[in-house]
Amino acid sequence: MSNIEKEIAELAHPELPNHNDEECLALAEKLMSQMTLKEKFGQLFQLAPSNANIEGLQWQETNDFNDLIKQGLVGSILSVADIKEIYQLQKTAVTQSRLGIPLFFGYDIIHGCHTGFPINLAMACSFEPKLIERVAQVMAFEASHNGITMTFSPMVDLVRDPRWGRVMESNGEDPYLNKLMGQAYVKGFQQDSLSSYNSIASCCKHFAAYGMVEAGREYNTVDMSERELRQYHLPGYKACLDAGASSIMTSFNIYNGVPATANKFLLRDILRNEWGYSGFTISDYTSSYEMLDHKTSANEREVAKQSILAGLDHEMVSTTYIKYLEELITANEVNEALINEACLRMLTFKYKSGLFDNPYKNIYANVDQYYLTNNSRQLAKEAAIKSIVLLKNDNQTLPLKPTTKIALVGPLGKTNELVGAWGGLVKNESCVTVYEGLVNQFGQANVQFAEGCNINDNDSSLFEQAYEVAKNSDVIVLAIGESQTMSGEAKSRAYLNIPGVQNELARKLKSLGKPIIAIVFAGRPLELEWYQNNVDAILFAWFLGSETGDSIADIVSGKANPSAKLAMSFPYTVGQVPVYYNQYKTGRPSATGKYSEFRSCYIDVPNYPLYSFGYGLSYSKFEYSNLQLSKKQISGKEKLVAKVTLTNTSSIDGVEVAQLYIECKSFSVVRPVRELKAIQKISLKAHESKELTFEIGANDLAYYNIDMEFTPEDTDYIIYIGGCSNANISDNFSYNS
Ligand code: NOJ
C-alpha cells in the first residue's frame, strides 16, 4: 500500500452536521472577513488540471496548478475522477493554503457514473419522473463515492432539432415533460441534504436556450423572441432551481446578441431579480474566453468585467477573473461588492455541502464495492426496458416465441459500445451486447450472428455472409443505427439517415421475405420511413447503457412489454426539421397536415412527423372512452376534473402513459396547437379498465399574454386525452377569471 492509499484507508466518515441556510451564510461571511481579495477571486475559479496551461498570470511565478491551490487561487476542480488524485488535490488545499478552504470537485455525471443508464432522451421516454429520481440517486451514490461533489446535470435545454448531437442529453421537445424530468434529476442527485454522504450537488444547464442552436449546428447562434424564451425554454431551468439545484451553468450561445456568460438580462434580471435564485452561476468550459471570438470583448480584461457585471460567479477553465478582477477593482471599473457577493455564494455552497466539516467526505478506500452493484444493474435494466420505444409491430411480430430461430444481423449486434455519449466513468465492458442478451433468452443454438457491414462506411463485402445466415432463420433481427460517438457534444449531423450501407443491407435482407425486426440505436431521432414501410417491427433503442442486451431480449421475448413514448418527434425527413407537436398555429393551417394549395405545408412531405411526440406502442392495446368533464366552465381558482376510462382491450398486461393536452381557442397571442398539461402512467391487466382522473386549473391554462404576463385569459379550451400528442378524444370547456 502506498502512503496515500494508507491515508485514504484511514479516512473516517462520521455523521456531519446539517447546517441550515442561515448558518451556512453566517459561516461563509465570517470566513470572508479573513480573506484577501485574491483569495476571494480564487473561489471564483474552476481549474481543469488537464488544461492547466495557464498563461500570463501576472502575480504568480509558476503555472503549476498545485501552486495556484496553495495560494488559495482555485475554488474547484473539473473532471478529475481518480480518487487518489482528488485526495491529493484536496489535501493541498486544506493543509497548504493559508485558510485551508476545501475545493469542490465537478464532473459530468449525465446518465451514469459507473453503472450505465440509458441516455437522457431515452429515459425521458419513460414519462416517469420517479424513475429518473431513482436513477439520479444511484448516480449520486456512485459519484459521491468517487470523490465527486457536483454533477453538471441535468441538461434541461429544450430541443427540436435532431441534427444537434446533444439532443441525447435532453428531455425532448415538451416544456412540461422537461420540467418534470429536470426536477426529478435534481431531487435524485441532491436528495434531502447536500451534506449527506450519498448525495451530490446538481448544476443544471445550459442557461439559456442552448437547445435552439441554429440548424442544429453545435455552438451556433441562438436567436428567439423573449416570448418564445419564456414560454418554452425558461420553465425547465426554473423548475430545477425551484427543486433546489445548487448551481446553474451558462451556455455557449448568445441570447439577444449577448453571450449567455455575460448576459445581464439572463443572469441578473431573470435569475436573481425575477426568480430570486441564491445559488451560484458557473460558465461553461471556456465560454468566457469565447467572448473574444464572439467579438463582444476586445480582450480578457473586458471579458472579466462584462462577466462579473452581468452576474457570472464561477469561471470554468477560463482565467479572466483571477487575472483581471484586481486590476478592475483598483481602476474602479468593478465594485468589490460584486466579488464579495459571488464569493459568498461559493462559500455558502461549500458549507452546505459539508466540505468544511469533512473535506474528504467523498473519498473512500476499496471503492469498487460501491459501483455497478446488483441493485444498480437491476435499476439500469428497468430504466432500459422503460426507455425502448416500440414504433411498429405489424401482425404481432413481437414478441417472439422462445423457439424462434433468430438471425441477428448488423454492426451493433455484437458490440458493447452502447453506453452512449457522456457516459461518465461507465466502461463499455459493463454493457451486455444484444447478442449476449438474445442468447441468454433464446439459447445459443437459436441465435446466429452476422455483422453485415460497418456502421459508417461503404463496404458491402459482408452482405453475402449475412444473407446466408438470415436464410436459415425464422426471423431477422437487425441491430443497426448510429455509433455512440455520433451524438453528444460537437456531434451535429446534417443527415438523419442510418449511416453507411446499413439501409442497403436491410433492403437486401428484405428480399428473403422473412419477418424483419429492426432494433435501432441512436442518440437522436432518425429518418425511418423506409423501415416503417418495409419491416415488420421497429424497436427504437437509443443507447441503453450497461443492461442493453438483456433489456432488449426481455422485450423481444415478451418477458417485458414496451411502454415508452417518444419525448421527441421523428421527422419523415431532415427537411421538415424542426418538426414538433406543440408548434404555433399558423394563419393558413392545412386541415389534413398534407399538401393543399396556398396552405402552410410542403408539396412533397406532410407537415406532421413520421412519429409524433407521445407516440409509442405496447404489446397490449389501449382504448380511451367516456371522457367526462366536471363542469363546462371553471372560474378563478376552481379546478376542472376530467375523467376518462382507459381499457386494456388485449389479453396482455401492460402499461400506458395517458396524456392530457389542451388547445386554447382564442388568446391575445398565438398559442401552440396543443400543449401537454398532465401525464399518468398506469398499469392495466389484460382486459382491465380503469377510470383516470385529471385536474386542470388556472395555472395550467396560463400563458404569456400580449403584455408578457403569465396569466390565463377568459376564453374557451379543448381538452384532449389519449396515448399520443394526436389524441383525439376531446371535450370543450371555458375559463372565467
Ligand atoms: C462543456 C459542456 O458543454 C458542458 O455541458 C459540460 O458540463 C462541460 N463541458 C464540463 O465538462
Image: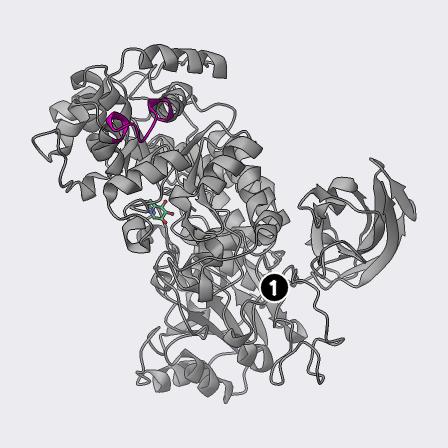
| Residue 365 in sight from this viewpoint | no
Q: Quadrant of residue 205?
A: top left
In-front residue for pair 632/454: 632
Image height of 545 relative to 272, above or below = below
Q: Quadrant of the N terminus?
A: top left
Relative image position of residue 186 (x, y in whole percent): 51, 36
Image height of 604 relative to 202, above or below = below
The amino acid type found where label 1 is placed reads: Tyr
| Residue 301 in sight from this viewpoint | yes
Relative image position of residue 276 (x, y in whole percent): 54, 29
In-front residue for pair 119/385: 119
Determine if the magenta segment contains residue 331: yes
Give the secondary structure at mark 1. loop
In the image, the segment drawn in magenta is 328-338
Q: Quadrant of the C terminus?
A: top right
Determine if the magenta segment contains residue 433: no
Relative image position of residue 323 (x, y in whole percent): 21, 34
Image height of 168 relative to 391, above or below = above
Mark 1: give few (<14), some (14-19) or many (20+) Cα within 10 Å. Answer: many
In-front residue for pair 568/386: 568
* Residue for badge 1: 580
At horizontal 71% and vertical 57% (from top left) the residue drawn is: 671
Q: Quadrant of residue 364?
A: top left
Q: How many marks?
A: 1
